[in-house]
């Protein structure tokens, strides 16, 4: 009994599955460039350094929420801008007025922007976007 | 001893991986080594499979674990003792997806006076299932870093896996299951004297490697975060062969490189380790052959003639005795 | 004073002091302890010469010098390389093990002895460690750290000890998540030892006998006929019927082949008498063969080549006699060979016809290529069609349990047929605990050529799990009879039962069938085939026999 064709077939299937990302990018077209964010024109500094904000903004927001909602504290001592109000709507969105061109670009790129729980971003369910969007 | 050596080896590997956080070395650890590891992994896999495929299966040595197909009124165990290709596919699917054989596991205890007790023992099966399936989920989840746009199925899996909605970002269930299962598998090996006796460096090394990967991954997501967009630029750049800018590479944290290096080590070690059981489980002749031995002749490709004692030689030696006893003979 | 060859030498309390904790010292550094009662004497030069096997010489296991050929190491390593090229099973099993330990407490020798090298995983590691050293890159680099070790004479001695402490029962292979079959490992190990002329005499002498005279016991044709005549006399005494003994009869419809163990030893002979009575009653056109007078095949315990050399007789004889198909008696490893090897090594049997029962007309489709049917399949079909007149109450003094023999269970799947037959010929049939029967059945402890008295300690230890299960049903249901469809079982389980479950006797199923069968022209059945009085049947009136259920 020659089972080599079966084995080679199985191997090909395995290889295709293991290299899925490579041929997916071929099939789906080369992905576009990494997201470019529209930064606020009137501000050059965020509350913390940009690098730290990129990696840790979710922690900051999480802490702000807890501080405001659970402890009633509203003032945050930031590294760059002194004391600011812990408010997504007023402080964050005050500068980053457009979530489409700022928040969501990265969130979609890294697949953390979906509506489901895993995305972790349901900020917009409560927080209204500022006018002018 | 083996435990300490393998633990030390994994720690050293991890520390070496951290060097990826340095300029120039980030190219080595971020781009060159992953490609090299992938090449060794895929090349090794192909080499192994072809190596096995080249070796024939001279005999059909199915291990039968249920009633054979015989008389039409006797109910055959079609999955545990398959006689058709579909039965074999079913058996193999159960074996590969559900670890059917491990599910039979029992624990034997010798009681007073030579009595023996057998108890169903499912912890090993449970841990093995938990570990393998959670690893598969984790691997699929990682596709979000290697695809753009991310397939809907990956998104769905992320949602299901994160349904607890604990933490920011949410903690995935599969991560916890993966780590707990691995911890159990390690403890079991280290505590049970018989298992410790049979365990090799290979066994501990792989457990620690996987634990290291799991823990560093968990840390990256939940404790010491890095810029995920930069990471994705790197990983997507790897998958699409388009590279990544040095500036972006420079913003990725050393911890990420530690994580990535452990993964590279695992990939490169894979074809040389016991992890080839991933191939072996498909190619085991006791499982992947139908028990239809008496129905369909199995051909041995290297069959050769052997020296036998023929009837003529037999009769020549014993003819007189046979005749005296009245047993018919060929030559009078 | 009893010797280590005798059962009485071993006290149960001492034998049961089993320490399952492995020693402090690693297994690679623990040498073999050849103590009497736990190893088998080596193959005699004369036997190897008859078979044309290499390096015939007389030697003793306890000798320091085993008189290996000068280039022994090269022979073994080349032998390994050759087998890695020829057997995918061997190659895959060398690589796949993850040492999960699921097999450890599945081996009867480990359960009954506690020697860690009797854990199937470690038995395989004995070979695997050498494989790593000489056939894998990592093993070469890492050495002992990578689980690799040098092939030395001590390793050869260790192989000898432990590959002749495996009965190739395949129980571990049922539980292994990768289906690693220690029988396959042991077969390879024994083949490699064989290249150096290392065999055990308990295997190689039967092989030589079988090669030359057609059966393991070396019974010559006239002796075989005499033996069967004696049985016919006993049959006549028990039933009043004189049965024919067709021997080497050309043109018979069926060639009947059974293990030669059934020709000489109690209780196998009663099973043999059962066959003779059954065939007589059915008026079957069958024949015995003196040339193919062995269904068993100790070649299985020697090498794949030897399987073929011994097995060749069966098809050759079927062809010479011009029979239509072959019927096989109750035997274990015989059926592994007939079912899994015969057609491949000596087929195709295109000169035979697809077996068809001349009594019921049933065509045995499951044997359409090999053309050989198991007696239990044949009898189950007869009973199913109501062709046997049975009075199971004659067996009422028998409270029987059924021991699945390793090979019919795990290399064939013959599980229901014997049970179906038993239920129809006995009113009192009780199963042993489920972890000890069917595919999980335990070996008798003496299979694969280990059933000799010089190996008594290991036989008793290996027989513990089976013995304990028998004693369980003995105490719970009053079981007094253990049925087994295997000649080795009928020889070795007698010892196991005497030791672990005294009072339980061993029997073949066909013996019970014949005891329950009503034969045309029989006289009043006061004694069974053992010529022992049937309780409750002394002077009983003949009544209408109960047929079968359909």
Image (cartoon, coloured by chain):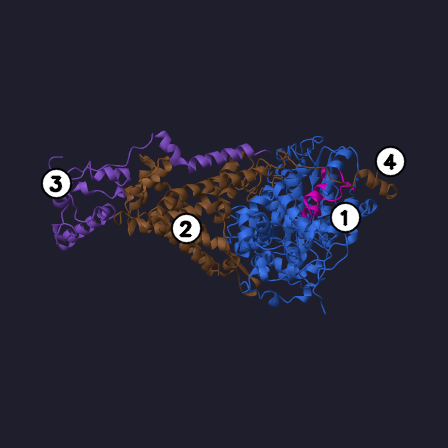
Chain colours: A purple, B brown, C blue
Query: In the rendered view, would you say C361 is above or below C33?
Result: above
The local secondary structure at tag 1 comes to helix
* Labels 1 and 2 positioned on one and the same chain: no
Kindly identify which chain the residue marked by label 4 belongs to.
B
Residues in magenta, as a range = C281-308
- The residue carrying mark 4 is B331
Is mark 1 in CB contact (under 8 Å) with mark 4?
A: no
Q: Splitting the image into 4 quarters, where does residue B68 fall?
A: top right
- The residue carrying mark 1 is C208
- Residue C284 is inside the magenta segment: yes
Q: Taking B87 as reference, is B297 left or right? A: right
- The residue carrying mark 2 is B210
Q: CA distance from mark 1 to mark 2?
A: 54 Å
Quarter of the figure that contains the C terminus of chain C: top right
Q: Taking C51 as reference, is C549 left or right? A: left
Quarter of the figure that contains the N terminus of chain C: bottom right
Out of C198 and C218, give the one closest to the viewer: C198
Q: Taking C402 as reference, is B149 left or right? A: left
Q: Nearer the viewer, mark 3 or mark 2?
A: 3
Q: Residues within 10 Å of mark 3 (few under 14, many from 20)?
A: few
Kindly identify which chain the residue marked by label 1 belongs to.
C
Could you say where residue C113 lies in the image, as x and y percent from the top left? 59, 61
Query: In the rendered view, would you say C277 is above or below B188?
Result: above
Is mark 3 in CB contact (under 8 Å) with mark 2?
A: no
Out of C515 and A50, give the one closest to the viewer: A50
The local secondary structure at tag 2 comes to helix
Is mark 1 in CB contact (under 8 Å) with mark 2?
A: no
Mark identifier at residue A42? 3
* Labels 2 and 4 positioned on one and the same chain: yes
Q: Residues within 10 Å of mark 4 (few under 14, many from 20)?
A: few
Q: Nearer the viewer, mark 3 or mark 1?
A: 3
């Amino acid at each position: 009994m020659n089972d080599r064709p079966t084995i080679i077939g199985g191997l090909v299937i395995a290889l295709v599955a293991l290299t899925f990302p490579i041929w997916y990018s071929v099939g789906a077209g080369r992905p576009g460039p990494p997201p470019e964010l529209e930064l606020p024109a009137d501000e050059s500094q965020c509350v913390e350094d940009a690098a730290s904000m990129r990696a840790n903004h979710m922690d900051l927001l999480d802490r702000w929420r807890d501080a405001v909602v659970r402890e009633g504290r509203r003032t945050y001592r930031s590294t760059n801008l002194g004391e600011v109000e812990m408010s997504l709507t007023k402080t964050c969105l005050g500068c980053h007025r457009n979530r489409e061109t700022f928040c969501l670009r990265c969130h979609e790129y890294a697949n953390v922007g979906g509506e489901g729980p895993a995305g972790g971003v349901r900020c917009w369910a409560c927080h209204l976007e500022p006018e002018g969007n | 001893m083996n435990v300490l050596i393998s633990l030390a080896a994994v720690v050293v590997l991890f520390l070496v991986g951290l060097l990826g956080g340095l300029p120039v070395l980030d190219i080595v650890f971020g781009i060159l080594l992953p490609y090299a590891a992938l090449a060794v992994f895929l090349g090794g896999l192909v080499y192994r499979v072809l190596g096995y495929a080249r070796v024939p299966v001279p005999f059909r040595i199915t291990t039968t674990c249920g009633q054979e197909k015989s008389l039409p009124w006797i109910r055959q165990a079609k999955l545990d003792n398959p006689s058709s290709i579909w039965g074999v596919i079913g058996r193999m699917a159960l074996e590969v997806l559900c670890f059917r054989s491990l599910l039979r596991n029992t624990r034997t205890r010798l009681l007073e006076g030579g009595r023996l007790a057998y108890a169903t023992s499912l912890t090993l099966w449970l841990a093995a299932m938990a570990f393998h399936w959670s690893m598969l989920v984790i691997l699929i989840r990682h596709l979000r870093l290697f695809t753009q746009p991310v397939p809907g199925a990956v998104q769905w899996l992320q949602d299901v896996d994160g349904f607890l909605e604990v933490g920011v970002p949410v903690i995935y269930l599969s991560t916890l299951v993966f780590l707990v299962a691995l911890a159990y598998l390690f403890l079991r090996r280290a505590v049970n004297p018989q298992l410790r006796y049979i365990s090799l460096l290979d066994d501990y090394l792989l457990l620690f490697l996987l634990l290291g990967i799991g823990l560093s991954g968990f840390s990256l997501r939940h404790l010491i975060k890095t810029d995920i967009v930069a990471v994705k630029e790197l990983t997507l750049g790897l998958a699409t062969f388009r590279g990544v800018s040095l500036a972006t590479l420079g913003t990725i944290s050393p911890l990420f490189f530690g994580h990535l290096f452990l993964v590279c080590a695992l990939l490169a070690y894979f074809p040389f380790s016991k992890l080839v059981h991933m191939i072996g489980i498909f190619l085991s002749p006791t499982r992947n052959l139908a028990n239809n031995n008496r129905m369909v002749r199995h051909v041995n490709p290297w069959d050769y003639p052997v020296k036998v004692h023929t009837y003529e030689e037999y009769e020549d030696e014993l003819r007189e005795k046979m005749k005296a006893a009245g047993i018919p003979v060929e030559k009078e | 004073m009893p010797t280590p060859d005798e059962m009485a030498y071993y006290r149960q309390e001492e034998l049961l002091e089993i320490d399952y904790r492995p020693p402090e010292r690693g297994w690679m550094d623990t040498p073999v302890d050849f103590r009497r009662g736990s190893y088998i004497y080596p193959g005699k030069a004369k036997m190897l010469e008859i078979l044309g096997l290499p390096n015939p010489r007389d030697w003793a296991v306890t000798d320091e010098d085993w008189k290996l050929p000068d280039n022994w190491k090269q022979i073994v390593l080349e032998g390994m390389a050759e087998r890695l090229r020829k057997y995918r099973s061997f190659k895959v099993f060398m690589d796949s093990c993850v040492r999960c330990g699921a097999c450890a407490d599945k081996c009867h020798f480990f359960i009954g002895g506690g020697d860690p090298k009797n854990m199937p995983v470690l038995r395989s590691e004995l070979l695997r460690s050498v494989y790593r050293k000489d056939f894998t890159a990592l093993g070469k680099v890492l050495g002992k750290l990578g689980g690799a070790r040098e092939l030395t004479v001590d390793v050869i001695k260790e192989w000898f000890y432990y590959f002749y402490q495996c009965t190739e029962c395949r129980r571990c292979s049922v539980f292994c998540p990768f289906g690693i079959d220690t029988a396959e490992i042991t077969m390879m190990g024994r083949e490699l030892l064989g290249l150096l002329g290392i065999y055990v005499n308990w295997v190689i002498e039967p092989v030589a006998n079988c090669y030359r005279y057609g059966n393991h016991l070396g019974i010559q044709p006239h002796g075989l006929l005499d033996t069967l005549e004696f049985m016919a006399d006993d049959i006549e005494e028990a039933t009043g019927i004189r049965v024919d003994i067709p021997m080497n009869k050309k043109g018979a419809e069926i060639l009947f082949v059974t293990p030669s163990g059934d020709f000489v030893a109690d209780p196998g002979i009663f099973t043999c008498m059962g066959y003779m009575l059954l065939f007589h009653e059915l008026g079957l056109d069958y024949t015995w063969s003196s040339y193919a007078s062995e269904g068993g095949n100790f070649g299985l315990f020697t090498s794949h080549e030897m399987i073929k050399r011994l097995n060749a007789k069966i098809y050759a004889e079927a062809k010479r006699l011009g029979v239509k198909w072959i019927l096989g008696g109750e035997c274990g490893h015989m059926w592994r060979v007939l079912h899994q090897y015969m057609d491949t090594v000596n087929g195709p049997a295109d000169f035979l016809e697809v077996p068809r029962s001349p009594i019921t007309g049933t065509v045995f489709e499951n044997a359409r290529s090999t053309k050989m049917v198991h007696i239990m399949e044949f009898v189950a079909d007869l009973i199913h069609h109501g062709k046997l007149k049975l009075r199971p109450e004659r067996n009422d003094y028998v409270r029987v349990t059924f021991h699945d023999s390793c090979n019919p269970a795990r290399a064939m799947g013959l599980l229901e047929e014997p049970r179906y037959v038993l239920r129809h010929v006995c009113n009192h049939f009780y199963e042993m605990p489920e972890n000890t029967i069917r595919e999980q059945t335990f070996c008798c402890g003496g299979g694969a050529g280990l059933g000799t008295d010089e190996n008594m300690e290991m036989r008793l230890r290996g027989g513990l799990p089976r013995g304990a299960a028998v004693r369980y049903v003995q105490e719970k249901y009053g079981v007094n009879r253990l049925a087994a469809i295997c000649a080795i079982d009928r020889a070795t389980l007698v010892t196991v039962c005497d030791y672990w479950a005294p009072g339980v006797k061993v029997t073949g199923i066909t013996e019970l069938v014949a005891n329950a069968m009503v034969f045309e022209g029989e006289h009043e059945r006061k004694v069974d085939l053992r010529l022992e009085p049937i309780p409750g049947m002394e002077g009983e009136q003949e009544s209408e026999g109960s047929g079968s259920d359909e």
